[in-house]
Image: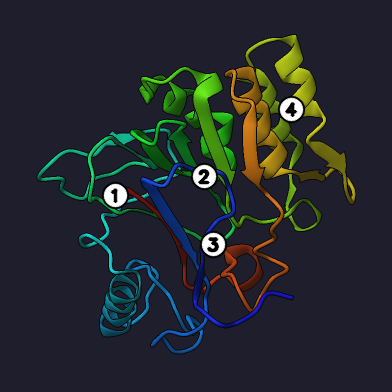
C-alpha cells in the first residue's frame, strides 16, 4: 500500500542530480467529485478555480523554477522542443535542453514516459496511449536526443495495467503493421494476451519497452503501476469516464 504523506512522489530511477521529476497522486487537492481531488487538467470539466489552486499548490510545494508548461494532448506523435517564449501547442511530448522549464504531461490510463541522458543535459516527457505508441512516438522521441540511445535512461510512469486494458484485435494489427523488423514484431506479439471472445489484453508497458529496445535503449525503470486498479492514487478514464488527470513533471536544474 502506498503511503499518503504527500500528494506526489519522486520516481525511483538513477537520473543525474540535474534532472528533477515528480508524479502527482489524485488526493490532497481542491477539486470535488468526480475530479476529487488533485486534478491538474483544465479540459475535463472541473472548475477552473480548483485546477488553478491545485497547480499553484504543486508549484509551491515543489518550489518549481517556473510555471509548468503543458500541451494540448491529441494522442499523436508530435514532440515539441521547449524554447524561450514557449506557447501551449498541440502535441504529445516535450524535449528540452534548457534549465528551469518544468514540462508537464497529463494522464488517466495513458502511459507517461520520462527520458534523460546520463549527462543530465537533455530531458523529455511524453504522453503515450496505444495510438501514440503504435504510431511510433517513441521512435520520434529518440530522434530528438543528441545522446546515443545507450546513454539514455527511461522511466515508465502510472498507466493502465495489463489485467484491465482490453482492446480489439485491430489494435494489435496496427502495432504489427508499424513494426520495425521481425524481432520487433515478436516483442509486440508477446505484449498481447487472449481475453474474452475476440478481445485481447494489451500490456502498454511492454509495448513501450519493445520500442525502446528496438531503438537501442537498455536502461528502463518503473512500469509497476495500474491506474485502473489503484483508485486511491490515480485517475482512470476507463474506470470512471468523467475524471481528472495526474501530472508527470520533469525539468532541468
Dots 3 and 4: beta carbons under 8 Å? no
For label 4, the residue is 188
Percent position of residue 167, x then y: 73, 46
Q: Earlier in the sequence, mark 4 or mark 1?
A: 4
Mark 4 touches mark 1? (CB < 8 Å): no
Circle 3 residue: 108
| Front position among marks 4 and 1 | 1
Dot 3 falls on a residue whose secondary structure is: loop
The residue depicted at 68 percent of the width and 10 percent of the height is 181
* Neighbourhood count class around disc 3 (C-alpha, 10 Å): few under 14, some 14–19, many 20 upward: many
Q: Residue at x 34, y 76 (%)?
A: 61
Q: Which residue is mark 2?
A: 113
- What separation in Å lies between label 1 and label 2 (alpha carbons)? 19 Å
Identify the residue under disc 1.
253
For residue 83, side relative to residue 36 (left or right): left
Q: What residue is at 45 percent from the left and 60 percent from the top? A: 22
What secondary structure is found at the residue carrying circle 4? Answer: helix
Of the two numbered discs 2 and 4 on the same chain, state the one appearing first in sequence. 2
Which quarter of the picture shows residue 108?
A: bottom right
Amino acid at each position: 500500500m502506498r503511503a499518503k504523506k504527500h500528494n506526489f512522489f519522486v520516481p525511483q530511477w538513477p537520473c543525474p542530480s540535474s534532472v528533477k521529476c515528480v508524479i502527482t497522486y489524485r488526493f490532497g487537492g481542491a477539486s470535488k467529485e468526480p475530479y476529487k481531488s488533485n486534478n491538474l487538467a483544465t479540459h475535463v470539466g472541473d472548475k477552473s478555480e480548483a485546477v488553478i489552486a491545485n497547480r499553484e499548490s504543486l508549484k509551491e510545494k515543489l518550489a518549481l523554477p517556473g510555471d509548468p508548461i503543458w500541451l494540448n494532448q491529441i494522442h499523436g506523435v508530435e514532440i515539441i522542443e521547449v524554447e524561450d517564449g514557449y506557447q501551449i501547442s498541440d502535441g504529445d511530448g516535450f524535449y528540452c535542453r534548457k534549465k528551469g522549464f518544468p514540462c508537464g504531461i497529463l494522464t488517466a490510463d495513458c502511459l507517461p514516459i520520462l527520458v534523460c541522458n546520463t549527462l543530465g543535459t537533455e530531458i523529455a516527457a511524453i504522453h503515450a496511449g496505444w495510438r501514440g505508441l503504435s504510431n511510433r512516438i517513441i521512435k520520434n522521441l529518440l530522434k530528438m536526443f543528441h545522446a546515443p540511445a545507450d546513454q539514455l535512461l527511461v522511466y515508465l510512469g502510472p498507466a493502465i495495467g495489463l489485467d484491465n486494458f482490453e482492446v480489439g484485435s485491430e489494435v494489435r494489427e496496427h502495432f504489427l503493421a508499424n513494426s520495425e523488423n521481425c524481432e520487433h514484431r515478436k516483442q509486440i506479439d508477446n505484449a498481447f494476451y487472449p481475453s474474452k471472445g475476440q478481445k485481447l489484453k494489451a500490456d502498454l508497458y511492454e509495448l513501450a519497452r519493445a520500442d525502446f529496445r528496438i531503438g537501442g535503449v537498455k536502461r528502463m525503470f518503473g512500469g509497476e503501476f495500474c491506474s485502473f486498479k489503484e483508485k486511491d492514487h490515480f485517475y482512470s478514464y476507463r474506470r470512471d469516464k468523467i475524471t481528472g488527470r495526474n501530472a508527470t513533471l520533469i525539468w532541468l536544474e
